[in-house]
Image (tube, rainbow, N blue to C red):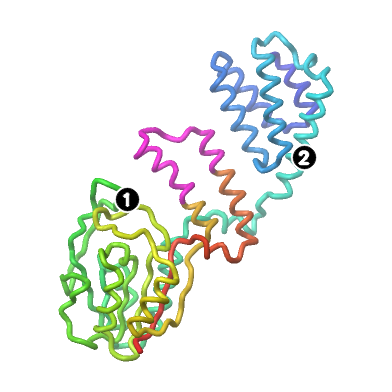
Amino acid sequence: MSLNIYMIFFKILGFPLKIFLQLRKSIICNQDNQFRYNEHLSRVIIKYFDLSDTQKKSLIYNLFLVLDQTSDRRETLENIFKSDQYKTVLIDGTLSALEQFNKNAIDSNTQNNFNFFGKENDLTRDKWVKKTLSSLRSGIRILDAGAGEKRYQKYCEHLNYVSQDNVEYTGTGNEGLHVKDWNYGKIDIVSDILNIPESDGSFDAVICTEVLEHIPNPVAVFDEFSRLLVSGGTLIMTAPFCSLTHFAPYYYCNGFSKYFYEHHLTRCKFQLCEISYNGTYLEYLAQELYRLEQVAKEYHGDELSDLSVELRDALVKNIYKYSLNTTKSHELLCFGLHIIAKKI
């Protein structure tokens, strides 16, 4: 199609000049490849309009219908626009989409929060652990059960810190997610977590973070912690509510609900002091949508197309907007639970 025809098209719809220039570039570069042309056009439209708008979907559908009818570059948009049906749907759809986009646009005050949306699983847990450990009385003896790389030892400088692990994981495996580089360093007690060679009541506190899912019999660990803690001792735990396969073959459960803790901690003579949630249903969805590129590459041998990335980002943006008004979706799904309990 000629440049003049596109100028008419954009004048009628009131599109910004930058969108026109991108569309013109797509046609010049891809006029012999209709699929790539349509994909590029879709990306441009998706970039500037809100996917949730129903009329915008009609806009895209009808726009492609127009393009299909003029793919031979012989029909002109002047003829197409003689049809009131196309003209009405395209113009109304465009104006409605622009109105909806402006209404839902993320303002500068919330943009920073959006940048971290779905990406704060580890950060939120680290902050909670740091705050909880800092509240413990100086000088008490604490066991880091399943310490791994002793991630939280730096928050225990005011405590008598003892690490424990079975030191079997190497950082690699044939299935699931792995960290590749893994270094235990010096572990104080190398043993099975269900049979730690320490006397009864030898610790004032026990911390066990992101370990339960890697224990074949996770229920039994509460009995061992109860044995090791003094009366009134503090148990600090985190574990996933839902997780993907990781650290295989040492992966036996994908998560634990609050009812799991309420039942088994009570049975082992613990009093629950705190159950808090890390993340929400919507944050979890965003986390996994961001993981799409990794999964596509590692499990399907392909990379996401630019269009797929644009669609993903647009969906995450809309999910974030919903998250601003949600209060209880964590009860359906979240990253994990944070637990504080006292030995009775």
Which residue is under mark 1?
A: 177
Q: Residue at x 59, y 32 (%)?
A: 43
316 vs 82: above or below:
below
Identified by mark 2, the residue type is Ser
Q: Position of residue 185 (x, y in %)?
A: 19, 65
Residue 294, quarter of picture:
top left
Q: Residues within 10 Å of mark 1 (few under 14, many from 20)?
A: some
Tell which of 221 and 288 is nearer to you.
221
Residue 298, quarter of picture:
top left
17 vs 327: above or below:
above
Q: Is residue 184 left or right of residue 14?
A: left
**Quarter in which the N terminus is drawn:** top right
Which residue is under mark 2?
A: 96
Q: Which residues are magenta?
A: 288-312
Q: Is residue 326 left or right of residue 181?
A: right
Q: Residues within 10 Å of mark 2 (few under 14, many from 20)?
A: some
- Judging from the image, what secondary structure is the residue with disc 2 in? helix
Give the dominant element type of the magenta stretch: helix, strand or loop. helix
Q: Position of residue 110 (x, y in %)?
A: 62, 58
Kindly identify which numbered label has been placed on residue 251.
none
Reply yes or no: does residue 47 show up in magenta.
Answer: no
Tell which of 9 and 277 is nearer to you.
277
Identified by mark 1, the residue type is Leu
Q: Residue at x 81, y 25 (%)?
A: 87
